[in-house]
Image (cartoon, helix red, strand yellow):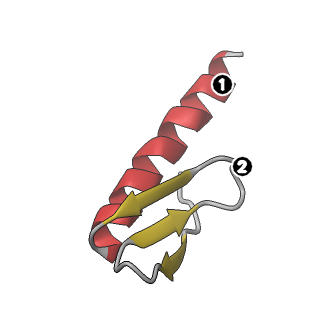
Amino acid sequence: MEFEVDFELEEDGRWIAEVERLPGVLAYGSTRKEAQAKAKALAHEVVQEQAMN
């Protein structure tokens, strides 16, 4: 499953990655790539949890 990830660079230099299709899936990283990886991992967890319910 693929997710569209939106990015924003904070003033302190951290990156935020958010999957808007999945409320609450938001992750920070010191690099854009790190934030993206964390957001995708969280998105997969959320989808698996939703499938179990």
Query: Is 40 in front, or is 25?
Result: 25
Query: Is 2 in front, or is 20?
Result: 20
Residue kind at label 2, given as amino acid type: Pro
Left or right: 34 as drawn, with respect to 4: left
First in sequence, mark 2 or 1: give its number.
2
Q: What is the crowding at mark 1: few (fewer than 14 residues within 10 Å), some, or many (at least 20)?
A: few
Q: Quadrant of residue 35?
A: bottom left
Left or right: 44 as drawn, with respect to 23: left
Q: Quadrant of residue 41?
A: top left
Q: Quadrant of the C terminus?
A: top right
Q: Secondary structure at mark 2?
A: loop
Left or right: 35 as drawn, with respect to 47: left
Residue 23 is marked as 2
Point out residue 2 in the picture as x, y percentages from the top left corner: 53, 59
Left or right: 47 as drawn, with respect to 27: right
* Residue at left offset 72%, top offset 49%: 23
Q: What is the crowding at mark 2: few (fewer than 14 residues within 10 Å), some, or many (at least 20)?
A: few
Tell me the CA gap for discs 2 and 1. 16 Å
* Residue at left offset 55%, top offset 55%: 26
User: Which residue was labeled with disc 1?
Assistant: 51
Residue 7 is marked as none
Point out residue 43 in the picture as x, y percentages from the top left corner: 53, 46
Residue kind at label 1, given as amino acid type: Ala
Q: Secondary structure at mark 1?
A: helix
Q: Quadrant of residue 21?
A: bottom right
Q: Mark 2 or mark 1, which is nearer to you?
A: 2
Query: Quick check: 23 above or below 3?
Result: above
Q: Residue furthest front?
A: 12
Point out residue 9 in the picture as x, y percentages from the top left corner: 45, 82
